[in-house]
Image (cartoon, grey):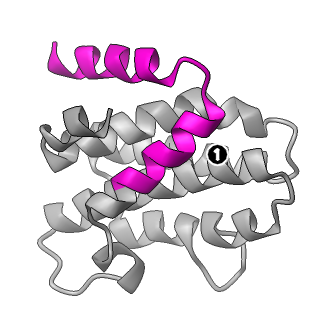
Protein backbone atom coordinates (compact mmCIF):
# COMPACT_ATOMS: atom_id res chain seq x y z
CA UNK A 1 0.00 0.00 0.00
CA UNK A 2 2.76 2.43 0.93
CA UNK A 3 4.41 1.90 -2.47
CA UNK A 4 1.53 3.66 -4.22
CA UNK A 5 1.75 6.57 -1.80
CA UNK A 6 5.48 7.05 -2.35
CA UNK A 7 4.72 7.77 -6.01
CA UNK A 8 2.55 10.83 -5.33
CA UNK A 9 3.74 14.32 -4.43
CA UNK A 10 3.87 15.49 -0.82
CA UNK A 11 0.78 17.71 -1.12
CA UNK A 12 -1.25 14.77 -2.43
CA UNK A 13 0.12 12.59 0.38
CA UNK A 14 -1.10 15.18 2.87
CA UNK A 15 -4.58 15.25 1.33
CA UNK A 16 -4.68 11.44 1.23
CA UNK A 17 -3.77 11.08 4.89
CA UNK A 18 -6.26 13.78 5.87
CA UNK A 19 -9.07 12.08 3.91
CA UNK A 20 -8.22 8.71 5.44
CA UNK A 21 -8.10 10.26 8.92
CA UNK A 22 -11.51 11.73 8.29
CA UNK A 23 -12.75 8.23 7.46
CA UNK A 24 -11.61 6.77 10.80
CA UNK A 25 -12.18 9.82 13.02
CA UNK A 26 -15.70 8.68 13.93
CA UNK A 27 -14.08 5.93 16.01
CA UNK A 28 -13.33 8.72 18.49
CA UNK A 29 -16.89 10.06 18.56
CA UNK A 30 -17.50 8.80 22.09
CA UNK A 31 -14.18 10.15 23.37
CA UNK A 32 -14.16 13.11 25.69
CA UNK A 33 -11.79 14.97 23.37
CA UNK A 34 -13.50 14.20 20.06
CA UNK A 35 -14.13 17.92 19.57
CA UNK A 36 -10.35 18.49 19.58
CA UNK A 37 -9.96 16.00 16.73
CA UNK A 38 -12.87 17.54 14.83
CA UNK A 39 -11.52 21.07 15.21
CA UNK A 40 -8.08 19.99 13.99
CA UNK A 41 -9.43 18.08 10.98
CA UNK A 42 -11.74 20.95 10.03
CA UNK A 43 -8.90 23.46 10.29
CA UNK A 44 -6.71 21.30 8.06
CA UNK A 45 -9.46 21.13 5.42
CA UNK A 46 -9.96 24.90 5.73
CA UNK A 47 -6.26 25.45 5.13
CA UNK A 48 -6.34 23.19 2.07
CA UNK A 49 -9.32 25.05 0.61
CA UNK A 50 -8.31 28.68 1.03
CA UNK A 51 -4.93 28.86 2.81
CA UNK A 52 -6.30 31.58 5.12
CA UNK A 53 -5.27 29.86 8.34
CA UNK A 54 -1.80 30.83 9.49
CA UNK A 55 0.47 27.75 9.90
CA UNK A 56 1.30 28.79 13.47
CA UNK A 57 -2.41 28.89 14.36
CA UNK A 58 -2.87 25.49 12.78
CA UNK A 59 0.17 24.21 14.67
CA UNK A 60 -1.43 25.28 17.97
CA UNK A 61 -4.13 22.69 17.33
CA UNK A 62 -1.40 20.05 17.21
CA UNK A 63 0.72 21.23 20.12
CA UNK A 64 0.32 24.13 22.57
CA UNK A 65 1.05 25.27 26.11
CA UNK A 66 -2.59 24.86 27.16
CA UNK A 67 -2.32 21.07 26.80
CA UNK A 68 -5.27 21.06 24.40
CA UNK A 69 -3.40 20.02 21.26
CA UNK A 70 -3.73 16.68 19.51
CA UNK A 71 -0.29 15.49 20.70
CA UNK A 72 -1.18 16.13 24.35
CA UNK A 73 -4.76 14.86 24.22
CA UNK A 74 -3.78 11.60 22.54
CA UNK A 75 -1.41 10.79 25.41
CA UNK A 76 -4.37 10.42 27.75
CA UNK A 77 -6.10 7.85 25.51
CA UNK A 78 -6.32 4.48 27.28
CA UNK A 79 -7.90 2.54 24.41
CA UNK A 80 -5.12 1.18 22.16
CA UNK A 81 -7.33 1.21 19.06
CA UNK A 82 -8.41 4.81 19.61
CA UNK A 83 -4.80 5.81 20.23
CA UNK A 84 -3.97 4.55 16.73
CA UNK A 85 -6.71 6.79 15.34
CA UNK A 86 -5.24 9.76 17.22
CA UNK A 87 -1.81 8.92 15.80
CA UNK A 88 -3.26 8.85 12.29
CA UNK A 89 -4.85 12.26 12.79
CA UNK A 90 -1.59 13.66 14.18
CA UNK A 91 0.39 12.22 11.26
CA UNK A 92 -2.03 13.68 8.73
CA UNK A 93 -1.89 17.00 10.50
CA UNK A 94 1.91 17.21 10.48
CA UNK A 95 1.93 16.56 6.73
CA UNK A 96 -0.61 19.36 6.22
CA UNK A 97 1.47 21.61 8.48
CA UNK A 98 4.62 20.86 6.52
CA UNK A 99 2.77 21.95 3.36
CA UNK A 100 1.41 25.04 5.13
CA UNK A 101 4.83 26.16 6.32
CA UNK A 102 6.36 25.39 2.89
CA UNK A 103 3.71 27.53 1.18
CA UNK A 104 4.98 30.50 3.17
CA UNK A 105 8.61 29.56 2.58
CA UNK A 106 9.18 29.59 6.33
CA UNK A 107 12.84 29.04 7.03
CA UNK A 108 12.41 27.81 10.58
CA UNK A 109 9.97 25.04 11.40
CA UNK A 110 8.81 23.63 14.72
CA UNK A 111 10.90 20.52 15.47
CA UNK A 112 7.82 18.31 15.21
CA UNK A 113 7.26 19.48 11.63
CA UNK A 114 10.92 19.45 10.69
CA UNK A 115 11.06 15.74 11.56
CA UNK A 116 8.29 14.80 9.08
CA UNK A 117 9.44 12.33 6.43
CA UNK A 118 8.37 9.08 4.78
CA UNK A 119 8.52 7.35 8.18
CA UNK A 120 5.61 9.55 9.23
CA UNK A 121 3.60 8.24 6.27
CA UNK A 122 4.64 4.67 7.06
CA UNK A 123 3.59 5.11 10.69
CA UNK A 124 0.24 6.43 9.50
CA UNK A 125 -0.41 3.38 7.32
CA UNK A 126 0.73 0.92 10.00
CA UNK A 127 -1.87 2.40 12.35
CA UNK A 128 -4.53 2.92 9.68
CA UNK A 129 -4.43 -0.75 8.68
CA UNK A 130 -5.02 -1.71 12.31
CA UNK A 131 -8.10 0.47 12.77
CA UNK A 132 -9.75 0.37 9.36
CA UNK A 133 -11.46 -2.66 7.95
CA UNK A 134 -10.89 -2.93 4.18
CA UNK A 135 -8.10 -0.37 4.42
CA UNK A 136 -6.60 -1.28 1.03
CA UNK A 137 -9.91 -0.77 -0.76
CA UNK A 138 -10.47 2.58 0.93
CA UNK A 139 -6.94 3.79 0.19
CA UNK A 140 -7.32 2.79 -3.47
CA UNK A 141 -10.64 4.64 -3.73
CA UNK A 142 -9.20 7.81 -2.24
CA UNK A 143 -6.10 7.57 -4.44
CA UNK A 144 -8.32 7.17 -7.49
CA UNK A 145 -10.24 10.28 -6.44
CA UNK A 146 -7.00 12.25 -6.09
CA UNK A 147 -5.91 11.32 -9.58
CA UNK A 148 -9.19 12.30 -11.23
- Residue 97 vertical placement versus 12 (above, below): below
**Is residue 128 one of those drawn in magenta?**
yes
Whether residue 53 can be seen here: no
Horizontal and vertical percent position of residue 121: 35, 52
Residue 145 coordinates in the image, percent (x, y): 27, 15
- x and y, in percent, of residue 74 in the image: 71, 63
Q: Is residue 11 magenta?
A: no
Question: How many numbered discs, if any?
Answer: 1
Q: What residue is drawn where x is 46% and y is 49%?
A: 124
The quadrant of the image that shows the N terminus is top left
- Report the magenta stretch's main SS: helix
Foreground residue, 20 or 59? 20
| Front residue of this view, candidates 89 and 63 | 89
The correct choice, above or below, for 93 with respect to 18 in the image is below
Name which residue lies at 54% across and 32% down: 22
Q: Position of residue 132 (x, y in %)?
A: 60, 28
Can see residue 133? yes
86 versus 1 height, above or below? below
Query: What's the magenta region?
Result: 121-148
Place residue 94 in its image quadrant: bottom left
Please name the residue shown 80% across and 53% down the image. 33
Q: Quadrant of residue 4?
A: top left
Q: Which element carries disc 1, helix, strand or loop?
A: helix
At a point 20% along the width and 45% down the height, the residue shown is: 11
Q: Which residue is mark 1?
A: 85
- In the picture, measured across the screen, residue 42 lies left or right of residue 145, that is right
Amino acid sequence: MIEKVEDICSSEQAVLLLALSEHISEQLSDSEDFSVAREALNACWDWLVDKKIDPDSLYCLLENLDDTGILTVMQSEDDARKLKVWICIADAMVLILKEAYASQADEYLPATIEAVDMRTVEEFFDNFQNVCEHSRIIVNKVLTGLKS
